[in-house]
Image (cartoon, grey):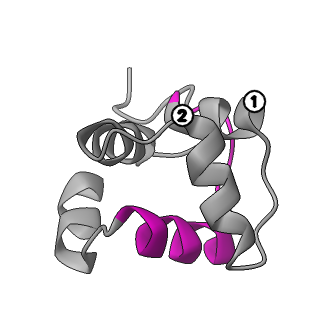
């Protein structure tokens, strides 16, 4: 079985790790995303964190800004 088989994204675990480290609820992250014109509900965020939803590029950029994820950390999680 391939490493990424049956997954819609490969960074869900990283998103959840950063959200929990900052003690942010899914609701709080969704509210902060709205300031970047990204409108997700908590169910969609949960599906992203569990690698069951594709993350669009503009969503990923906003999530990285909201969660203070650096490019190198993002890149390392993909490799």
Q: Secondary structure at mark 2?
A: loop
Query: Residue 33 colored magenta?
Result: no
Quick check: is 57 in the magenta stretch? yes
Q: Which part of the image, by quadrant, shows the N terminus?
A: top left
Q: Which residue is mark 1?
A: 43
Residue at the spot 47% in from the left edge and 67% down from the top edge: 66
Q: Decide whether the magenta segment is chiefly helix, strand or loop.
A: helix
44 with respect to 46 (left or right): right
Image coordinates for residue 53, horizontal then vertical, percent: 68, 39
Q: For this view, does 48 lie left or right of residue 76?
A: right
| Residues shaded magenta | 50-67
Query: Circle 1 — which element?
Result: helix
What is the x, y in percent for residue 38? 76, 69
Q: Give left or right: position of 64 versus 39.
A: left
The residue at 65%/31% (across/down) is 47
| Residue shown at 30% from the left, 67% from the top | 69
Residue lying furthest top = 1
Question: From this viewpoint, is residue 8 visible?
Answer: no
Judging by the rendered image, the residue that carries numbered circle 2 is: 51
């Amino acid at each position: 079985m391939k490493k990424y088989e049956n997954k819609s994204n490969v960074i869900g675990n990283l998103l959840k790790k950063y959200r929990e480290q900052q003690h942010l609820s899914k609701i709080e992250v969704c509210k902060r995303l709205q300031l970047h014109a990204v409108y997700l509900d908590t169910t969609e965020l949960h599906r992203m964190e569990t690698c069951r939803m594709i993350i669009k590029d503009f969503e990923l950029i906003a999530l990285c800004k909201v969660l203070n994820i650096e490019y190198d950390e993002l890149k390392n999680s993909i490799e």
